[in-house]
């Protein structure tokens, strides 16, 4: 890390209906392979993960916050939005209901975050192509109407997951007002103690150099 | 051989031979006692002549910190110089002799010519059993008793020694032993040679008198009866390991109370074991109070040593005391924690001696919390009850039968009552599975003998009565009883007029009463289901509880956003902050969070001019901090951990943890590929690690369920007034608050402009 400027800390948030696979997206992106089955229970149960990424020669540190399981807490999740630069709204392409709920989530976004926050719509479970209930075109059009990025992905087969995060982060980096002035504040909220509090979590410094160019290095 | 000397050298009782060897180990061969001079000669010749040892392969890792024992790794090769009948052999290592556990070793087939004969010499039968009653030490380890006499003759062994030799010493695949009785219920479902080899090994070990004598058996060997040349049986012990599971050493499944009295493990024996401990202690009363099974090393390693002992003794249980399941059906880690198992194995495990006493309680709790994720309550109940009247294995000798009855049957019955007792008392069988209660009452009522069990059954019936009446009392909060003299128990005033005039403490109290009522209804199985689906009757109570968060938030928004004047809005916000503070004081963190989220959320949060007039904004900041997700809700978690009394917890973080644990851990453990393709694959192994994690989270979530608020008095008028307001707020459609908030923001800006203009104009 010596020689290069400290990476901006970005806070990303994953929202969407329950069982659209938010946590799977997160775990797929941060872990590539899941922890061994008998891994000590102490390492499991993190609600957000820290991950390092290199994009166009710039290093960024991502804290990704997952709201899985809390979908019924409409008001509680508001505390998650504070300070987020990027939001991934996920739905399940094989479950129409999760797509139809998107307007509700975007209303919430209007309420809680500034318009410059980068949003990305991700249609997950592409592996369930055979039971697709939402066409790619529909998804894309919805994303365009709401001014956000769009991708279809499968956490299960690891398709499009890295790309989704990469594209989102690129867009954030292209929007300096999101992170540059707010950097000190974000540092205090988003990365307060990501490492020490999670024994067994990803060691950023150890892995960062190896495959830094290939998206998330964790 | 005095007791002090025994204690000094750990778990194995020292015979003259071992004295000699100890002398060797200490490099003082001359110092051996005179009364065993013959042995000295033999041992010294071992020491001074080039070692004539046999070469053994280490089948497993063995770790020890005892200076006179040798740690080794799997596949190490050791030269065994001397075989002590205790099961501890002396290995030459680095020019010194060290003790190693024989059962961890396997002969190297290529050197089989060097292996000692496998037929016990005729002198051996007396060596183990006969002096038992006089030593007084055997009671700690009731594996061999006088009854063992019955099967000491090699003739009793149904297995032809030559057959044994051939299967043990050949490299090539061996065939399952045909004479292994397929009708034996203990082994009937064993379908592969591993299982049969295991059992065969142990059976022959149980039947041949001098056989595999692990350290824990050593106490049964008489202090003086063994001779240095009497070291011939370890074969069968080795054979039981030589075909061991591919992934970990054959963790034995039954602990036969090998732990020394007063050890920390012993002191934590949970209830079902207690009678046994006492029983054996009583039998042991003639002997020294300190059992020979003291930890072989310092007290810091007593625990691991005890574990090691338990493991060894369980591996050597006679076949008729073994569990039904095979090693393939239950995986246990090095510390005795259950990792995975089939449903029948997991249920049976509840009834077996654990490797570690502490593990028994934790396993039981996890099982009773999470079993609904893999089986039904009826199945668990019926299976447990079926063990209560289990049939003895066929073809037992009378002494074997007695031993089975004493060490398997009765302990199992005791444990069944104990498990059910915990189920009733701590896991609310009567709420989750009321259909079992009549059956259980009938079952318990029929237990008349033996006395111990009858008493337990009666106590259990009383527990049943208690929880059923208690439940009614617990879940109802006193409704305005005038008799209360508690200062806290003041009756709430009936709410009058507008919201701002309602007493903030009364509102907080009633929110707490309402929430705690819903919270106490949440059942652990609902939390289990939550990670799979957040809808439907399977999670009804949990969803209802969570739902009140949004309902309260809606009320907060409605009350603030329907105020036309800015000043009144600010006052209302202040009033809510006061209510939130009161909730916090009562540890009703759940309602507090709902109020804080509504106030700090977008709809109210963007009314900046209103907030400029709010007096308690700083207080709100502190409350917001408590609900901050940073560091996995570190601030809240610290508070949660510190609380012990009544509380309505903020559970959202646990819900995410449940989902993560669910997604992270597979439901089933991958089963190892069968060593041979024609073997039957074991049934799926339930991933107990996952259950463990889920159980932990659920335990956190429901930590306060049985801790009711006792100092709150409900005023029904207040409750219904609150409910009325909430219903009104919830009836507004989703866009209402947003729209209203936009309007107010617009008005505020306009008013601000007017103010500024007036200011500018000099007013």
Image (spheres, coloured by chain):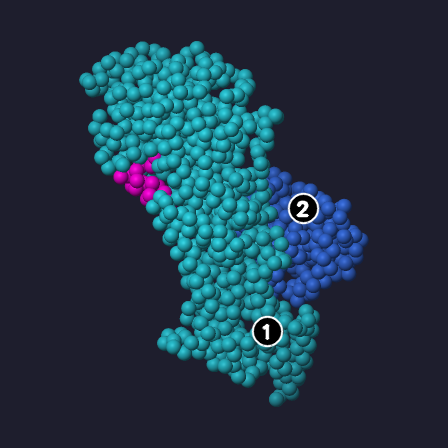
CA–CA distance between discs 1 and 2? 40 Å
Determine the colour of chain B: cyan
Task: Write down the quadrant of residue B2 in the picture.
Answer: top left
Q: Pointer 1 and pointer 2: residues touching (CB < 8 Å)?
A: no
Please say if B560 is above or below B222.
below
Name the quadrant containing residue B537.
Answer: bottom right
- Residue pictured at 54% horizontal, 81% vertical: B500
Q: Is A8 situated above or below B383? A: below
Residue in front for this viewpoint, B253 or A137: B253
Residue A155, numbered circle: 2
Q: Residue at x 65, y 48 (%)?
A: A25
**B507 or B562, which lies in front?**
B507
Taking the image as shown, residue B163 lies to the left or right of residue A58, namely left
Q: Is residue A68 visible?
A: yes
**Residue A206 appears at what percent x and percent y?**
55, 41
Highlighted magenta segment, given as a residue range = B258-282
């Amino acid at each position: 890390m010596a020689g290069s400027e400290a990476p901006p800390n970005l806070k990303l948030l994953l929202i969407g209906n329950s069982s659209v696979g938010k946590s799977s997206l997160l775990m797929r992106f941060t872990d590539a392979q899941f922890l061994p089955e008998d891994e000590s229970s102490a390492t499991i149960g993190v609600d957000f993960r820290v991950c390092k990424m290199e994009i166009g020669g710039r290093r960024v540190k991502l804290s990704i916050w997952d709201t899985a399981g809390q979908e019924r807490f409409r008001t509680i999740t508001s505390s998650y939005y504070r300070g987020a630069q990027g939001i991934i709204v996920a739905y399940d392409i094989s479950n129409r209901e999760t797509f139809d709920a998107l307007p509700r989530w975007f209303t919430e976004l209007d309420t809680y975050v500034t318009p410059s926050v980068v949003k990305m719509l991700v249609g997950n479970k592409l592996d369930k192509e055979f039971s697709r209930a939402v066409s790619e075109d529909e998804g894309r059009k919805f994303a365009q109407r709401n001014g956000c990025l769009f991708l279809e992905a499968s956490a299960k087969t690891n398709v499009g997951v890295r790309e989704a995060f990469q594209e989102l982060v690129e867009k954030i980096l292209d929007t300096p007002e999101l992170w540059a002035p707010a950097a000190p504040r974000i540092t205090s909220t988003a990365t307060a103690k990501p490492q020490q509090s999670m024994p067994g979590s990803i060691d950023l410094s150890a892995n960062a150099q190896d495959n830094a160019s290939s998206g998330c290095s964790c | 051989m005095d007791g002090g000397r025994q204690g000094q050298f750990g778990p194995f009782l020292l015979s003259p031979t071992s004295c000699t060897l100890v002398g060797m180990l200490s490099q003082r061969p001359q110092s051996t006692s005179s009364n065993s001079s013959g042995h000295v000669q033999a041992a010294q010749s071992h020491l001074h002549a080039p070692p004539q040892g046999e070469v053994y392969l280490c089948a497993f890792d063995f770790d020890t910190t005892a200076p006179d024992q040798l740690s080794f790794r799997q596949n190490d090769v050791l030269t065994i110089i001397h075989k002590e009948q205790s099961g501890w052999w002396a290995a030459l290592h680095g020019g010194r002799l060290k003790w190693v556990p024989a059962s961890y070793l396997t002969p190297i087939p290529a050197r089989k010519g060097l292996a000692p004969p496998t037929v016990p010499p005729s002198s051996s039968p007396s060596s183990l059993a006969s002096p038992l009653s006089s030593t007084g030490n055997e009671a700690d380890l009731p594996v061999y008793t006088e009854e063992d006499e019955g099967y000491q003759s090699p003739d009793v062994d149904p297995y032809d020694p030559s057959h044994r030799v051939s299967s043990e010493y050949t490299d090539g695949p061996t065939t399952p032993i045909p004479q292994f009785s397929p009708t034996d219920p203990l082994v009937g479902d064993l379908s592969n040679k591993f299982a049969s080899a295991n059992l065969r090994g142990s059976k022959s070990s149980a039947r041949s008198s001098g056989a595999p004598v692990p350290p824990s058996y050593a106490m049964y060997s008489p202090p003086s009866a063994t001779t240095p040349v009497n070291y011939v049986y370890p074969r069968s012990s080795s054979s039981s390991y030589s075909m061991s599971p591919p992934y970990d050493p054959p963790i034995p499944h039954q602990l036969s109370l090998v732990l020394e009295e007063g050890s920390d493990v012993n002191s934590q024996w949970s209830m079902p074991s207690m009678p046994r401990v006492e029983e054996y202690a009583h039998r042991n009363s003639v002997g020294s109070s300190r059992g020979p099974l003291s930890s072989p090393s310092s007290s810091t390693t007593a625990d691991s040593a005890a574990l090691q002992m338990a493991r060894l003794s369980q591996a050597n249980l006679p076949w008729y005391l073994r569990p039904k399941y095979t090693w393939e059906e239950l995986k246990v880690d090095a510390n005795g924690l259950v990792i995975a198992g089939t449903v029948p194995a997991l249920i049976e495990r509840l009834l077996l001696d654990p490797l570690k006493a502490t593990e028994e309680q934790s396993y039981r709790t996890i099982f009773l919390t999470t079993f609904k994720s893999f089986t039904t309550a009826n199945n668990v109940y019926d299976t447990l009850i079926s063990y209560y009247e289990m049939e003895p294995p066929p073809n037992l000798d009378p002494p074997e039968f007695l031993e089975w009855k004493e060490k398997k049957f009765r302990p199992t019955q005791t444990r069944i009552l104990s498990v059910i007792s915990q189920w009733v008392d701590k896991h609310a069988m009567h709420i989750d599975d009321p259909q079992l209660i009549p059956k259980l009452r009938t079952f318990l009522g029929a237990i008349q003998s033996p006395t111990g069990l009858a008493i337990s059954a009666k106590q259990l019936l009383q527990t049943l009565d208690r929880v059923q009446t208690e439940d009614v009392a617990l879940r109802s909060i006193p409704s305005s009883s005038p008799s209360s003299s508690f200062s806290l128990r003041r009756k709430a005033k009936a709410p009058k007029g507008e919201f701002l005039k309602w007493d903030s403490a009364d509102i907080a109290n009633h929110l707490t009463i309402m929430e705690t009522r819903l919270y106490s209804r949440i059942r652990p199985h609902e939390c289990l289901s939550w990670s799979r689906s957040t809808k439907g009757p399977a999670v009804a109570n949990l969803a209802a509880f969570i739902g009140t968060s949004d309902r309260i938030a809606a009320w907060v928004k409605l009350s603030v956003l329907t105020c036309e004047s800015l000043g009144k809005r600010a006052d209302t916000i202040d009033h809510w902050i006061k209510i939130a503070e009161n909730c916090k004081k009562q540890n009703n963190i759940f309602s507090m969070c709902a109020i804080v989220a509504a106030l700090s959320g977008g709809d109210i949060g963007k009314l900046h001019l209103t907030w400029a007039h709010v007096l308690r904004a700083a207080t709100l900041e502190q409350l917001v901090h408590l609900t901050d997700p940073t560091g996995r809700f570190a601030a809240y978690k610290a508070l949660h951990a510190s609380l012990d009394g009544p509380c309505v917890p903020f559970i959202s973080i646990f819900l995410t943890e449940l989902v993560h644990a669910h997604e992270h851990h597979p439901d089933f453990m991958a089963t190892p590929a069968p060593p041979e393709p024609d073997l039957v694959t074991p049934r799926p192994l339930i991933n107990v690690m996952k259950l463990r994690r889920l159980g932990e989270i659920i335990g956190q979530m429901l930590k306060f369920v049985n801790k009711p608020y006792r100092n709150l008095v409900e005023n029904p008028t207040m409750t219904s007034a609150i409910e009325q307001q909430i219903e009104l707020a919830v009836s507004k459609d989703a866009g209402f608050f947003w729209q209203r908030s936009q309007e107010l923001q617009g008005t505020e800006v306009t008013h601000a402009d007017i103010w500024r203009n007036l200011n500018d104009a000099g007013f």
